[in-house]
Image (cartoon, coloured by chain):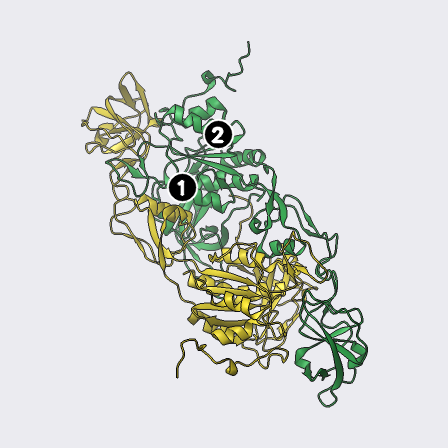
Chain colours: A green, B yellow
Amino acid sequence: MNTPSQPSRPPGNVRDVRMTGFSERAVVSEVLDWLRHQAEPLGTESVPIGELSGRVLSHPIDAPIDVPSFDRSAMDGYAVQAAATHGASLYNPLGFSIVGESLPGAGFSGSIEASTAIRIMTGAPVPDQATCVVPAEHANEADGRVEITRPVPEGRHIGRRGEDVSIGQRLLETGRQLRPQDVALIGSLGLDRADVYRQTRVRLLITGDELVAPGEVRRDGQIFESNSLMLAALVERDGGLLETAPPVEFVADQRPAISEMLTRPDADIILVSGGSSVGSEDHAPTLVAELGELTFHGVAMRPSSPSGIGRVGSALVFLLPGNPVSCLCAYDVFAGLAIRKQGGRGVDWPYRPIDGVLSERISSDIGRLDYCRVAIDDNSPPNISPLAISGASILSSTTRADGFVMVPAELEGYASGSQIQVWRYDHCDRGPGDP
Amino acid sequence: MNTPSQPSRPPGNVRDVRMTGFSERAVVSEVLDWLRHQAEPLGTESVPIGELSGRVLSHPIDAPIDVPSFDRSAMDGYAVQAAATHGASLYNPLGFSIVGESLPGAGFSGSIEASTAIRIMTGAPVPDQATCVVPAEHANEADGRVEITRPVPEGRHIGRRGEDVSIGQRLLETGRQLRPQDVALIGSLGLDRADVYRQTRVRLLITGDELVAPGEVRRDGQIFESNSLMLAALVERDGGLLETAPPVEFVADQRPAISEMLTRPDADIILVSGGSSVGSEDHAPTLVAELGELTFHGVAMRPSSPSGIGRVGSALVFLLPGNPVSCLCAYDVFAGLAIRKQGGRGVDWPYRPIDGVLSERISSDIGRLDYCRVAIDDNSPPNISPLAISGASILSSTTRADGFVMVPAELEGYASGSQIQVWRYDHCDRGPGDP
């Protein structure tokens, strides 16, 4: 007999790992393969042009019009017939009667001849009969006439209709993360909206009875909660949309409260901070398994080994360890990838890789990915120095560090003097100085 | 006789360049030197912790407390006296009576002895008498007792008070642009605000009688305005605060309207798009000179030569050409630097420099800085190819390009095959794939 309220997997089949430890840990590459399949772009939405910068196109942009849509002057000066300027020089200035003016948005409706000119501004329509524009620098105007002191070839300083964009042209492809100039290009076509991937809706589920918000009064044994602040900033960096901006309310380490947050609709991704491991108060892993699927629990990496990944309903759930370094690392390796991919951004890391020389040995265990915080100096190539104090609970190691090295599972580490790749924490990269 | 309404410089002394051309153009390095002196950090403000990510500290952060503020467990397991675990093995498990539990936020108030243990969770306070934590993986609990199967040394799996941060420690320096983990660190100290440089307040002054907003009906000779969209996104990228987000209202090419926008208070920087040159409708340069100081008008660079920079009251004013490529280039070379520096961000460019090999000659004039849009391929080193169609009015050249090359004023260009530096447009840099 089927009852509709039956959970997708009977609780009896869920292995309770609390206070028994992880029997095995998933290999990181296996988890990433699974994630890449699970996290697909979510859908699209039409967004007003003023909010498009940084968003990702879900459909290409093809030009509905020519830009410019008329021949226009590229200079401030005088529109004339080019042939009539032949022979002009400082010693032989050629004179033209000024018969009118073409201003931006207000063209000249009359006609010109070989002996006449109109004053014309940058961006103003060029009348059909004119074949060039003489820049103001090479002309002297007085008493309704202008003298031209240089010959100007046909077509010079005229921007032709469609020279920037011609109607029907494919301008921007699906998947483009829009730069400031891309938004301007879309606007120049007259479009006031565009279709982009919708942003991943992210719920923060912060658990821990010991937590107190910064600024509040702290009792013995309590700690100031900070993972929500870090996660909120990371989600924003990766283009996700937080359900609630910090300060978020903490959730008690109790099954009903966590269950409610896991099953409430309208999140694409749920980030659970704390209670992810095998402690007796770690309810989230069991609940994810009961309410949906706990695909991975325990990952072969350091820190962050007590991470979990699964699904409840349509939401991907990431169980992030409460230790702040583990939380950062597990977010960056797993959750960030999913948020970016669901939002159409692809899977590339938002960190800059640079090459350097290791100043000191890094040791690691085979079979485990290691996330090692390092200092980077200004030499060329830079020296990379692992930080001495760098446990999973030492948040300050991630603020003292300039970046991190990932030691792959198949290596025992790197010898001093190795050439290695390091990822810089300052993701928005700068050039030295200015031009 | 002094009258208070007298302008800072009599209009009679202002050279009117309209329809006469620029007699000389300022060298870019001279303009940048002036700007670096003029643009100083504006002031500071206290900002709630949830809004700190990406902001720049105006004061250092020193730790007001130890973090952690008590000895805490780094594992889920059992707190015991380390000496009592000596000799434990799978063949010789050692038993302890469980006399209590320490949970996060709810420590154990009793005492333990050599023969007793408490259950302890990650993050929970370690009682004074306990000297190590045995991970749950190396213990078996049953019937109020736990058997330990490995010896554990003194201090193992205990995070000592102050091991992350010790009271009084300097953690973050003035000028730090806050990363997600920095914000978390500040929060972990219990601080719910920090002092940062206030953001540069930027006014957009979009002039041009030919302009119509995207989505509106366009008449003959009109064009869709798009510089405001580009500038808004650039200002946001550089940490500025727009007075009005797009869509912004356009300002008529008329002296009173432009004058009002130049003198209205509460802008640190005014970006004027269009009407910056020497056309008869270009009122902004004259007005800046009359109402304040037009320090530079005409700059030795291509595009963007008809740019102007000056001051009205306390606001820096940038006259940006209406041509979209010129507008982007003049913003990036001059205005962006000022916005970043006023906001405490320093002067570095928000573009990534990479080295490549030029596939085709770039020619340039001596005495003029050239901004040349290029395509960059995926070779190593990358081939850099200048775009063929790249006039100042060709906005699509900046969307087809992957980046740009700056040809310094002292060079005639670069020969094909030159090793050159190119700046990538995708400022937020990514690594290939994931770890």
| Residue A18 drawn above or below residue A189 | above
| Residue B9 drawn above or below residue B53 | below
| Residue A218 drawn above or below residue A183 | above
Residue at left 57%, top 51%? A50
Can residue B413 be seen here?
Answer: yes
Measured as percent of width and height from the top left, residue A263 is found at 47, 27
Measured as percent of width and height from the top left, residue B267 is found at 45, 63
Q: Which of A310 and B7 is in front in this view?
A: B7
Circle number at residue A246: 1
Tell me the SS state at disc 1.
Answer: loop
Q: In this view, does A7 lie to the left or right of A114?
A: left
Query: What distance separates the C-alpha of mark 1 from that of mark 2?
Result: 28 Å
Q: What residue type is labelled 1?
A: Pro
- Chain identifier of the residue bearing label 2 in the image: A
Measured as percent of width and height from the top left, residue A157 is found at 71, 72
Question: Are labels 1 and 2 assigned to the same chain?
Answer: yes
Tell me the SS state at disc 2.
Answer: strand
Measured as percent of width and height from the top left, residue A256 is found at 40, 23
Residue at the far bottom in the pictured view: A91
Circle number at residue A296: 2
Q: Nearer the viewer, residue B280 or A165?
A: B280
Q: Is residue A236 left or right of residue B130?
A: right
Dividing the picture into quadrants, the one containing residue B330 is bottom right
Q: Residues within 10 Å of mark 2 (few under 14, many from 20)?
A: many
Can residue A24 be seen here?
Answer: no
